[in-house]
Amino acid sequence: MRIYGIVQGVGFRPFVKCLADEWGLNGDVCNYGPFVEINVSGTEEAVSSFKTDLISRAPKRADIKKTETIEISEAVLNKGFYIKASESTDGLIFIPPDIAICDECKKELFDKDDRRYLHPFINCTQCGPRLSILKNLPYDRERTAMKEFAMCPECGREYHDQESRRFDAQPVCCNDCGPSVYLLDKNGKELCRDGAAITKVRKVIKNGGIAAIKGIGGFHMACDASSGDAVNELRNRKHRPSKPFAVMMKDMDTVFRECIVNDDLHKALLEGPEKPILLLDKKEGGIASDAIAPGNLSIGVMLPYAPLQLLLFDYPDDVEDFPDMLVMTSGNVSGAPICRDEAEAIEKLSGIADVFLSNDREIYTRADDSVTDCFEGQPLMIRRSRGYAPVPVKITADIPADRCIAAIGGELKNTFCISRGDLFYPSSYVGDLSDIRSAEVLEETNRRFLHMLEAEPETIVCDKHPQYVSVKIAEKLSEEAGIPLIKIQHHYAHVLSCMAENDHRGPVIGISFDGTGYGDDGTIWGGEVFIADVHGYKRAGHISPFVQAGGDASSREGYRIACSMMQGKVSDRDALKLLGSCMDERSLKIERSMTENNINCVLSTSAGRLFDAVSAVLGIRYRSTFEGEAAMSLQTEALKYLKEHDHIEKQVYECENADIDTDGLFGYILNERLSGADVKKLAFDFHDMLAKRTAAAAAYAASSAGIDTAALSGGCFQNTLFMGLVKKELEKKNIKVITHSMIPPNDGGIALGQAYYGAFNSGDRRNLI
C-alpha cells in the first residue's frame, strides 16, 4: 500500500507498526517522502481488517489524501513488522504543518512526577513544530533544527520503543537534552535562563511591561490584555493606533467569560490541532481592555498552542495573580515580516520590548498565526499560515503529473503557491511587499519550498500590475530560470482562487470586490462581474466608475474618495457639512480642482474605496490607519443596527445589464445622511442595497451567458454581513454560490488562483474568452 497525504510528522509509521502487530502481520513500512509505503502479508481476514483500520483509526493529526493498493504474488519474507529507514524518491510531496500541543503532552507538562515536567519544548508524534523547523524531506530529525540537539539515552529509548507515544517522534527531547529558554535585555545581554527566565518575564508582564517572546514560527509581542495602560503603551511603541490586537486566553473558561461562543465550530477551532486566532463577539462584562480592538464588536482569540505559552500562564513561582489574557501580536515592525531569530528581534524590536524571551531552537520557515472567522457553519480564513500551511489543495482535474507552476501572489498579504500535478501548495503568510524585508522573505521562502517539494517550475505566474514588487520578483525568477512568465489580471486571479478551492472549472459568474487591482484598460478595478473559466474571462460588468484623486493617499483617506463622488451631487456647503472635520473650504477647492483637471487622478471601480467613501459620508471613519479600517467600522455600525432591529426586506432590485449602479446608491446614502437619517440604519442599508444591486447584475450576466454558478472573492467578502446578503440574493435567483473557506478571499489567496490558471494554461498565454 502507498499512502499519500499528511502522514509524516504525525506518528503514522509507528501507528502502522502497532496496527500490524495487533493483527499479527509481517512486513515493513518506509517513508519515501511523497508517500509512506507499507508491505504487509498475513491471512486474508487480518490484512482486510488492517486496511480498514488504517483509515478509520489513523492518527487524528494525519490527513490521508489518497491510497494505492497492489496485490503482490510473493509473501513478505521477514518475520514480524519493521519500520525501515526513510528513503527518497520522486513524486508528490506532503509537508507537515506545525501542530498545537496535544492533551497528553499538556498533562505531562504539569505532572510533577513526569520527567518532562515544565519542559518548554515537550512534544510527541501528535504535536509540536514541523514546517517551521524543517529543512528538507523526508521528515527525519537530521533534516530539522533538532539535529543540533542529540537525544539523551532516555529520549533515545522512547524514540525506539514502539510502545511509546514518542516512538519515531523526530523533535523528541526533554529538560536534559532539548533546547533552552533564556531572557535577554534590549541590548542582547543574557539575564537568566530556564525557569528563572520564565518567572522574570511573567513579572515583567504582570507589572505592565512588554515582552518579545519567541514562539513556534517567530516572535510575539506580549502584554497584559486586561490592562488598558499596558495595551496602549504597546500601541504607542508599535505605532499602531487602532488595528486590533490578537489575545491569547489561558483556557476555555476565560474565553467563555470574555466572548460569545455560540456553536461547536468555535470550540473545535479554538481547541483543535491548528489553534488559529478566531474572531469572536465580545461579551458584556468581560475584563479585556477596550484598547485591544477599539470600536469593534469582536476580538481575535486563540488558546495557547506551545508548551512555553502554557507555562507563561501557569508556572510554580512567586508571581501571584498573573493575567489570564495576554496580547499576542506578531513581533515585527509594521509592514515587515515576523522576526524569527533573536538578533533580528533585538535589532527591530528593542524600541518596543522591555525584555526578550528567546531559545536556541532555530526557526527555518516563519509562520504567523492563522486568523479565521466563521460563515454559515464553516471557517472563513482571513490569514492562512501556522497550522494550515502548506497543506495542499487537491484538484480532481486531469493535470499532467509533471506540471509544476510557481505563482508569486499579490502585493499585500502576500503568499505564494507552488503546484505539482493536481496538488497546490499555498505558502505560509509572508506579508506586504512594500517593505523590502518582506520581498526578501518571499524569495528566500519560495526557494526553500521549491527545494522541499523537489519542484522545478515550468512556468511562473504573477499579477499584471507593472509597478508591483511581486511582479518584479517574478520577472527576475523567470529570467534566471529561463522559463515563461504569465501575467494575469488581479481580480480574475481572485475568482480562480475561489474556483480552485471549490474544485470548480467553470464557467462561473465571478464577483470580485476588493480595494485595488490593475485593470486591463490601465484604470483601477475592484468591483467586478466576470464571466470566467480556467482559460480566461470576460468583463461583463462593474460598479459605477468614479474619479479617485490623491494617488496612494486616497486608499487611506476615504473622505477624499467621498469628496470626489459628491461632486455634482451636493453643494460645497453640504460637502463641508459632512466632511468638515477633515476639510475646509480651501482644501475642498483644491480637491475639486484636482478632479476637474485630472491632476493625480485615476478612474476607479474599486468596491473597497466605495465602502471607505460611504464610511466617511456617514461620519464613521474619515481615514484608515490600517487596510480595511473604514470598511470594518462601516460593517460594525450595520451590525449594531441589525442587533436592534429586524431585517426588513427592501424592494426587489432588477437591472437591464451587468453593471452595478453604485452611483445612484451613493446618491441615496448622501441625501439620506443630509436629511438626518440614522447612521446605523444607513450603514445597513448600504450593505443591503449594494448586495441587491450586485446580485441583480450577476443574475443578468448569468442569464445572458447561460451560467448557473457564481463565485464570490476579494477582500470585501471578508465582510460576512455583505457576503451573506449577496449569497442570499443570488440563491433567490436560483444561482448556486461558491465561496471561500480554507483559502482567504483577500489577497492572501490569489496565488492559488494564479497557480490554478498556470496549471491549465502553461505555455498558452490566452486570458480572454
Image: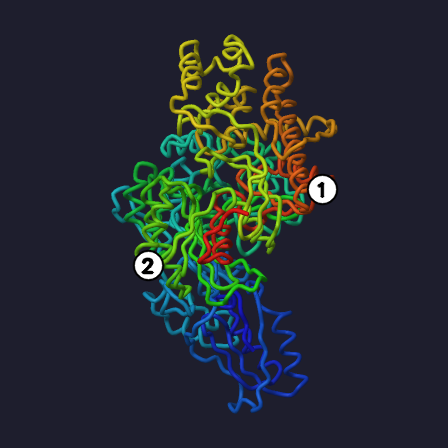
* Residue at 31 percent of width and 54 percent of height: 479
Is 353 left, or right, of 562 in this rendering? left
Where is residue 101 shown, x and y percent of the image?
A: 50, 57
Where is residue 112 shown, x and y percent of the image?
A: 48, 60
Of badges 2 and 1, nearer the viewer stands 2
* Residue at 40 percent of width and 41 percent of height: 432
Q: Report which residue position mark 1 lands on.
A: 731
* Residue at 48 percent of width and 23 percent of height: 561
**Callout 1, which amino acid?**
Glu
In the depicted view, which residue is nearer to us: 639 or 218? 639
Is residue 678 shown to the viewer in this render? yes
**Callout 2, which amino acid?**
Ala
Disc 2 to disc 1, C-alpha distance: 46 Å
Q: Secondary structure at mark 1?
A: helix
The relative height of residue 552 versus residue 397 in the rendered view (above or below) is above
Q: Report which residue position mark 2 lands on.
A: 481
In the depicted view, which residue is nearer to us: 333 or 355? 333
Where is residue 656 shown, x and y percent of the image?
A: 67, 31
In the depicted view, which residue is nearer to us: 391 or 219? 391
The relative height of residue 229 versus residue 406 in the rendered view (above or below) is above
Q: Secondary structure at mark 2?
A: helix
Where is residue 449 shown, x and y percent of the image?
A: 40, 59
Q: Residues within 10 Å of mark 2 (few under 14, many from 20)?
A: few
In the depicted view, which residue is nearer to us: 238 or 452? 452
